Image (cartoon, rainbow, N blue to C red):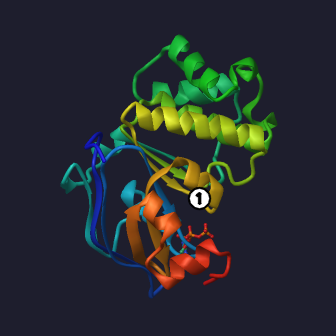
Amino acid sequence: MTETGAIVGAENLSLDIGGVRRLDDVSLRFEGGGVSVVMGPNGAGKTLLLRCLHGLQAPTSGRVTLDGATLTDRDRLRQAMVFQAPVLLRRSVAANVDFALKARGIHDADWRNACLARVGLLERAGDSARRLSGGQQQRLALARALATRPQVLFLDEPTASLDPASALTIETAITEIAGEGVRVILVTHDVAQARRLASDVAFFARGRLVERCDATRFFDAPHSGEAAAYLAGRYVL
Ligand SMILES: Nc1ncnc2c1ncn2[C@@H]1O[C@H](COP(=O)(O)OP(=O)(O)OP(=O)(O)O)[C@@H](O)[C@H]1O
């Protein structure tokens, strides 16, 4: 793998919620080129991991790093996250992207339109964001994230409820973004999608990092029984 882009890390990261350990001593680094995929059964801790890596959730112990140093609030401006259920403003599609830009002191209609075009929403720029379908809202959330020119992009099941055409639009954008050197960390349950996009995989179960390797190895010959069972559709927490 080629060394490229920001390096996102977790060092002995643990997270307790309500007295229950949800992430357990997770240490890993996202580096190299391409798209990193995080997989694992429901409740494995994937979303919580992303929230910690993006600085939205403070770990109980351990630390999150960006380029080797502890993540700061300022660093978070270099990162963006698209959530499973994006929250949009009750304004136009364009205004949702403009808002993200304005928060960084930027007004750039051409760039906003380029971001909307990238996710196939330029024709909907003047429509109310709340009138978009679920899949279109996901695409808008991606455009909004991209508008901030992040060096790190966290995507939490961005195509979970999308039709094949919308999913393809997002997958194409993800591939392009990663090719431009953005560190893309994608949570997905879609094994076919993960096979198409992943350069490396981190597999979680019960809050623990069970397997971490390049994608070809993971899909062709997973080492752990949990990963093999998950890929065969047999592993449920
Ligand atoms: N705010 C919270 N309060 C209590 N428990 C929580 C909270 N957030 C997450 N959990 C629990 O922590 C565990 C991990 O949640 P998380 O959302 O990270 O799972 P996930 O791997 O992303 O699952 P899925 O594939 O279903 O999205 C789950 O058992 C969940 O119920």
Q: Residue at x 57, y 55 (%)?
A: 194
Residue marked by disc 1 = 188
- Label 1 amino acid? Thr
- Residue drawn at 62 percent across, 81 percent down: 235
* Rendered location of residue 30, percent (x, y): 33, 55
Q: Is residue 51 above or below residue 170?
A: below
Q: Which residue does the image show at 57% across and 28% down from the upper left?
A: 97
Q: Position of residue 68 (x, y in %)?
A: 18, 54
Q: Nearer the viewer, residue 123 or 2?
A: 2
Q: Residues within 10 Å of mark 1 (few under 14, many from 20)?
A: many
Going by the image, does 119 lie left or right of 178?
Answer: right
The residue positioned farthest toward the front in the image shown: 220
Q: Position of residue 152 (x, y in %)?
A: 38, 43
The location of residue 171, given as percent across then percent down, is 60, 40
Query: Is 236 located above or below residue 187 in the figure?
Result: below
In this picture, residue 228 sits left or right of residue 2: right
| Ligand 1 quadrant in view | bottom right
Residue 233 falls in image quadrant = bottom right
Front residue of 166/214: it is: 214
Task: Report the quarter where the C terminus lies.
Answer: bottom right
Say which element carries label 1.
Answer: loop
How many marks the image carries: the answer is 1
Front one among 215 and 183: 215
